[in-house]
Image (tube, helix red, strand yellow):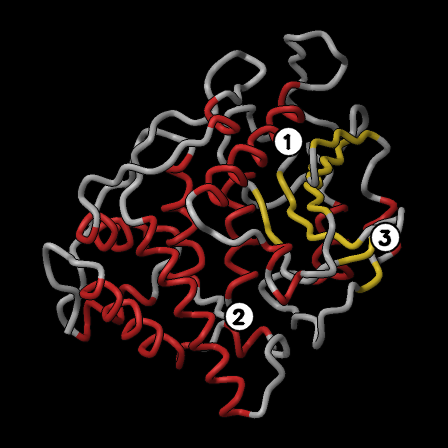
Amino acid sequence: MRTLWVLCVLFITFASPATAAPDKDKSCKKLPKEMASALGSAIHQKDEFVVHYHATGPNAIQEKADLNGNTIPDAVEDVATKLIAMREMLTSNGFVHPFKQPRYQQVRQIHAIMLPVKGNGVAYESPRTMPDGTCALIIHVDNDVSSENITPAHELFHLFQYGYTMFKRPWYLEGMARWSESMLRATPPKTAPLPKSNAELTAFFDKKYDAVGVWYALTTGVDPVGQIKVPESAANLRYVSGKKMVQDDKLPGVAFMRAVLEGLDKLDDQISTAQGLTPFGWSESMQRDQKHDLPMWKLIETLYHTHGPTGRAAP
């Protein structure tokens, strides 16, 4: 049986993204002692990405293949390379790196911690001071993910989302992140009908990962061709197995999705001003409040028409 005590530590002392309030300012908070002790002694770093993992013991990497014989598990190397590939795809297509956003200007690294977790991964919005003093954003990747599992890219996109806006409504957060996965893989999600009634819209607002179908309908509506830029820095990246990280140059609606994030950035600023909040001082409940659904959707609907759709979103 896999040991899950580290997960308990994470959700009690490190602050679960589902229950914890974000930092009230842009400071980098201390990493809880229990979390620091659970990091493991094995580290693999590429660029700003630092992957922590256990080589032995109950929290050890489950996939131990080492095809290139460099003593680093392929699953670990592929996490780091996958994060670089996703960063290159996002920034080359106009998405702003979290470090360049006002919220995270003090952050210097992104740490991917490979430990047992319910689900495949978690992305934390609050920056933390690592044991070496570096201010970092943290994602949590399950230690049992396969080399080609897309979770690290999905979680990195969440960090990009956090850089833009405080909103954390699941239909937006998870649906859009699921759309972003197709920057690396060729199999697109299936489209779902755009909501046409209040009942359908309410049902959409209750979705999480499965909201991607509507997002994909929106993006194919504004951009049916969906050709994106694949920079050489990403095109040349491969898994340790030799398979290309970026499978093709097709993903609809990149400009539209950028515009949505930029629009949500302005919308949360307006709400902060109206309610006398600091820009990054929203509580967790505020970020996830259903009252934001309609203003967010109205923004998305407006942008959908602005970007030249082939059909209409909900009225």
Split into 4 quadrants, where in the image is the C terminus?
Answer: bottom left
Task: Please give the name of the residue rendered at 61% of the width and 57% of the height, measured from the top-left corner.
Answer: 100
Q: Measure how far apart labels 3 and 1 are at the Cα level.
A: 24 Å
Query: Which is closer to the viewer, label 2 or label 3?
Result: 2
Disc 3 residue type (three-letter)? Glu
Crowding at dot 2, Cα within 10 Å, few <14 / some 14-19 / many 20+, comes out as many
Q: Nearer the viewer, residue 122 or 215?
A: 215
Q: Secondary structure at mark 2?
A: loop
Q: Secondary structure at mark 1?
A: helix
Counting from the top left corner in percent of width and height, residue 141 is at 62, 40
Up the image or down, 55 lies above or below 174; here it is above
Counting from the top left corner in percent of width and height, residue 171 is at 37, 61
Q: Which mark is residue 46?
A: none
Q: Nearer the viewer, residue 230 or 61?
A: 230
The residue under label 1 is 80
The residue under label 3 is 34
Callout 2 touching callout 3 (CB < 8 Å) = no
Split into 4 quadrants, where in the image is the N terminus?
Answer: top right
Q: Earlier in the sequence, mark 3 or mark 1?
A: 3
The residue under label 2 is 166
Place residue 184 in its image quadrant. top left
Up the image or down, 286 lies above or below 45; here it is below
Task: Please give the name of the residue rendered at 65% of the width and 45% of the height, measured from the top-left corner.
Answer: 140
Q: Earlier in the sequence, mark 1 or mark 2?
A: 1
Q: Measure how far apart labels 1 and 2 are at the Cα level.
A: 27 Å
